[in-house]
Image: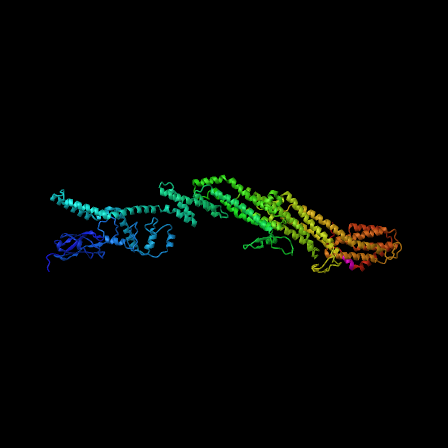
């Protein structure tokens, strides 16, 4: 079929994009000769002929249908021109969800809308018809742990309808793999939505402007037709009928939409209520949140929420808010009571105390919780100290002396006993010690642990209270903080009394255990109760002093004023003095046991081990006193106290005298198993006297010699060494101690020496007279002398025996003993010669020979006294006037010396001069 016209050509469309059912105007050429000529119209592949209105050959108006393609051409088909073409295209946008009450510039397909509402598979919020995808791009959800997101964004949410919406959370959860370009498109979509929302109703008017024009044209045409007809005011006219139709349409519409509008009003009121709940959900949820956070212990969260609620609703006039806020105040009141109970609980840490005080301060708790806590802690410390004493007293009554309770409740030896015994200064003790510590020592250590464990935190709590850091971590100055700091400054005297009460209680409890005599009877009832416990030893008191010192140093390190700790210093001074006195007395008792350890083994100097044991014992005693006697910072030198100095000197002298008395007792001690024997030693051995048998028991005379040697060693060495040790350890009055000790040992030496000489000299002296007159010898009638008689030789041999005995013990004693023996013999010879009434010539020669022989034999041991006695003896003899007599005496003397040369060798000049006493 031939056509007379050109095919239709579309050259424009307005608008060029839109959602389905958008009204568009198509312009072009050869669009038909009339409505009947238009037989086809498609936009984006959808047939729009049903809604097409042919206006002219260059203009067609229609509505875009729901096409499958997003963008396509506009094809017009006419009978006259056939299938046309298009130079433009139309972009079909996605349909937005429009509520029944939303404004719209196009007609909404109600079936699609209601189908969507009744679809049970979709969940649409009745409060909001907001799009599920606000960015307008596809989501690509990646599974991310909800706990990780909550930890990364605390108190935030990925729900864009939430008040705490976090865009970062939303992007991580829904677009973690979206490209940057897509995100830029999404940003543009958001801008368009924002602009569209800002335009408001005007945007809908612009979108449906052609509709308004069409309605205006229709109304104008009707008005013109009615004017031409002239029947607009005639009863039954078209105007009247139209009015009635419109009224009925209006009534019908009202009837149809009355339920909808009612539901709308109800929905609006519900929405408003929910908006209020949503907007003020913080307040409405606060009572429950407070309860939950209290149970979890999140007091900081509760306080922050309370402060926020108080600032927002504290002065509200809204009844609902006031009612909810009253419930909040009730919960906060319960929290204040709970925190105060926790604050006053004991025991508790300083950190918890500060935390609870700060919580109560932030909650504006009535009163002064910090001071209440300080008072409670003060009573708690005092109670702990008293309980400590009572527990030890109870344990003491139960018979578990020196024992402690382990974690299983069983008794075990206290480790302190080992400390006490290891510090003992007993030397050579073979007795086994029991690993037990006196109860008083354990008590003082436990008491010190209580004080040093509790008082530092107590003091730090007070410091924080005074400087205000207890109430504000940031140090901010608020009215409440300044008020509390002022209260703290006003209570300084009260706190000082608390510290004084704790230190005085500590001192009195220690005194009750160690120095009960220093307490009054009333105080003894409160702080004593230890009964008749044995007095502590020096090592135990040393341990106590160390413990008390440690407590004082720990408290002084807290910068507690010295006047509050002075009472502890006074206790330390008394304990140090007491330790000194007890140690010296104990040493005196221990020295009394030293004679039992005498083994009579003689060294090269002729001294037994007893002086060395005594000196070692004293040195160890001084070393054990070094710790207690050393002056720490703030302590006094107790040796400078006149009373202590005198007492210490007196006790030291007493120790020396005790040891000297022990020596005297040893010299006279009877030994039932003792047998007279000589000392088995090798006189010529270089290791002289070291090989004495363990079962050796010296004779009484040998005991005297050994004790004499010991006395000499004490005077020349031991006492001087001890004097140096005394001075080195701070003792005063060492000159007096040394002087009295030397005087005492010299007195003992003199007594023992006289006793020994008497024992040895009396038999020799007593044998002289019988020996002289043996065989009825008569000085007046005797034969001429032929040599020295045997009695004198026996006397010299006896002296030699004494010499050997003394030399075996100590070479230093030989000159002194032999000289005294010679004095006794010379005195007796002088007496015997002076008692002779007359001498014959031969008798005078015999007497002179024997006296000269004796004198010449012991000439190196002559003293002034013995020399005078020999002179008196010779003066009592007749003088020799004949040269022959002198020659005879001289020959006989030489004969005597020659025959007894070996025996007289021991009387050679000694290497040591006689001791001067």
Q: Is residue 557 visible?
A: no
Left or right of 99? Residue 739 is: right
Range shown magenta? 902-907
279 over 903 or under it: above or below: above
Quadrant of the image containing the N terminus: bottom left
Q: Position of residue 364 (x, y in %)?
A: 43, 42
Count up the numbered dots: 0
Queried whether the magenta region covers residue 32, the answer comes back as: no
Q: Residue placed at 62% from the left, 46% from the top?
A: 578
Q: Nearer the viewer, residue 688 or 66?
A: 66
Q: Position of residue 778 (x, y in %)?
A: 88, 55
Q: Position of residue 597 (x, y in %)?
A: 68, 55
- Which quadrant of the view contains residue 606? bottom right
Q: Nearer the viewer, residue 486 or 677?
A: 486
217 over 856 or under it: above or below: above
Q: Residue placed at 54% from the left, 55% from the top?
A: 408
Left or right of 391? Residue 756 is: right
Q: Nearer the viewer, residue 481 or 247?
A: 247
Q: Residue furthest right?
A: 781
Q: Is residue 760 visible?
A: yes
Q: Position of residue 444 (x, y in %)?
A: 58, 48
Left or right of 755? Residue 274 is: left
Queried whether the magenta region covers residue 904, the answer comes back as: yes
Q: Residue placed at 40% from the left, 44% from the top?
A: 327
Magenta segment, principal secondary structure? helix
């Amino acid at each position: 079929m031939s056509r007379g016209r050109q095919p239709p050509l579309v050259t424009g469309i307005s608008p060029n994009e839109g959602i389905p059912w958008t009204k568009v105007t198509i312009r072009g050429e050869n669009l038909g000769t009339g409505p009947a000529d238009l037989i086809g119209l498609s936009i984006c592949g959808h047939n729009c002929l049903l809604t097409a209105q042919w206006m002219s050959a260059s203009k067609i108006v229609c509505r875009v249908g729901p096409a499958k393609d997003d963008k396509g051409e506009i094809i017009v088909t006419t009978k006259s021109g056939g299938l046309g073409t298009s130079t433009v295209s139309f972009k079909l946008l996605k349909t937005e969800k429009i509520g029944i009450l939303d404004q719209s510039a196009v007609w909404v397909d109600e079936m699609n809308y209601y189908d969507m509402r009744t679809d049970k598979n979709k969940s649409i919020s009745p409060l909001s018809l907001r799009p599920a995808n606000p960015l307008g791009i596809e989501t690509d959800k990646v599974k991310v742990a909800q706990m990780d997101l909550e930890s990364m964004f605390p108190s935030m949410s990925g729900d864009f309808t939430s008040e705490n919406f976090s865009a970062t959370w939303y992007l991580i959860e829904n677009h973690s793999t979206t490209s940057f370009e897509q995100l830029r498109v999404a940003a543009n979509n958001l801008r368009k939505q924002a602009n569209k929302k800002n335009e408001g109703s005007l945007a809908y008017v612009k979108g449906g402007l052609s509709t308004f024009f069409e309605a205006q044209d229709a109304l104008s045409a009707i008005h013109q037709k009615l004017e031409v007809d002239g029947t607009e005011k005639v009863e039954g006219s078209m105007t009247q009928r139209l009015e009635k139709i419109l009224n009925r349409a209006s009534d019908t519409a009202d009837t149809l939409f009355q339920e909808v509008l009612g539901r709308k009003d109800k929905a609006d009121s519900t929405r408003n209520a929910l908006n209020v709940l949503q907007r003020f959900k913080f307040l409405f949820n606060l009572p429950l949140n407070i309860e939950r956070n209290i149970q979890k212990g999140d007091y900081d969260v509760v306080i922050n929420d309370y402060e926020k609620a108080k600032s927002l609703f504290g002065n509200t006039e809204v009844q609902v808010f006031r009612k909810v806020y009253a419930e909040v105040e009730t919960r906060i009141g319960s929290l204040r009571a709970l925190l105060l109970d926790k604050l006053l609980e004991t025991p508790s840490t300083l950190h918890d105390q500060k935390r609870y005080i700060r919580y109560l301060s932030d909650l504006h708790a009535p009163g002064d919780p910090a001071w209440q806590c300080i008072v409670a802690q003060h009573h708690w410390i005092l109670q702990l100290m008293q309980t400590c004493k009572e527990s030890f007293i109870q344990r003491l009554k139960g018979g578990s002396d020196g024992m402690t309770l382990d974690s299983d409740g069983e008794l075990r030896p206290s480790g302190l006993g080992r400390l006490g015994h290891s510090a003992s200064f007993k030397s050579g003790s073979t007795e086994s010690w029991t690993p037990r510590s006196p109860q008083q020592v354990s008590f003082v250590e436990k008491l010190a642990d209580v004080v040093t464990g509790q008082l530092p935190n107590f003091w730090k709590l007070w410091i924080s209270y005074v400087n205000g850091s207890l109430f504000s971590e940031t140090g901010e100055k608020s009215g409440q903080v300044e008020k509390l700091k002022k209260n703290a400054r006003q209570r300084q005297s009260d706190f000082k009394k608390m510290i004084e009460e704790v230190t005085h209680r500590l001192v009195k409890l220690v005194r009750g255990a160690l120095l009960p005599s220093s307490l009054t009877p009333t105080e003894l009832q409160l702080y004593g109760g230890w009964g008749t416990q044995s007095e502590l030893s020096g090592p135990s008191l040393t341990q106590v002093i160390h413990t008390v010192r440690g407590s004082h140093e720990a408290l002084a390190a807290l910068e507690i004023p010295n006047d509050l700790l002075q009472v502890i210093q006074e206790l330390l001074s008394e304990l140090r003095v007491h330790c000194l006195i007890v140690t010296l007395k104990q040493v005196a008792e221990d020295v009394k046991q030293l004679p039992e350890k005498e083994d009579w083994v003689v060294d090269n100097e002729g001294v037994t081990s007893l002086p060395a044991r005594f000196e070692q014992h004293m040195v160890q005693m001084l070393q054990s006193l070094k710790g207690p006697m050393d002056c720490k910072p703030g302590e006094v030198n107790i040796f400078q106290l006149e009373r202590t100095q005198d007492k210490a000197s007196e006790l030291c002298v007493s120790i020396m005298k005790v040891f000297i008395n022990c020596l005297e007792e040893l010299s006279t001690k009877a030994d039932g198993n003792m047998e007279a024997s000589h000392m088995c030693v090798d006189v010529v051995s270089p290791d002289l006297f070291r090989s004495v048998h363990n079962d050796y028991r010296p004779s009484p005379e040998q005991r005297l010699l050994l004790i004499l040697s010991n006395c000499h060693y004490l005077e020349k060495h031991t006492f001087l060494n001890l004097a140096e040790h005394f001075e080195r350890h701070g003792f005063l009055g060492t000159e007096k101690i040394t002087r009295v000790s030397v005087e005492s040992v010299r007195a003992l030496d003199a007594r023992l020496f006289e006793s020994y000489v008497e024992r040895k000299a009396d038999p020799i002296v007593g044998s002289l007279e019988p020996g002289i007159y043996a065989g009825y010898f008569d000085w007046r009638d005797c034969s001429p002398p032929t040599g020295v008689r045997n009695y004198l030789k026996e006397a010299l041999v006896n002296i030699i025996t004494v010499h050997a005995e003394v030399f075996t013990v100590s070479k230093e004693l030989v000159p002194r003993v032999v000289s005294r023996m010679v004095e006794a013999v010379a005195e007796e010879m002088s007496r015997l010669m002076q008692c002779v009434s007359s001498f014959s010539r031969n008798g005078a020669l015999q007497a002179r020979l024997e006296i000269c022989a004796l004198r010449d034999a012991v000439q190196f041991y002559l003293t002034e006294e013995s020399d005078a006695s020999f002179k008196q003896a010779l003066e009592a003899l007749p003088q020799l006037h004949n040269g022959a007599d002198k020659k005879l005496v001289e020959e006989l003397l030489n004969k005597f010396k020659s025959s007894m040369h070996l025996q007289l060798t021991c009387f050679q000049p000694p290497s040591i001069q006689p001791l001067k006493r």
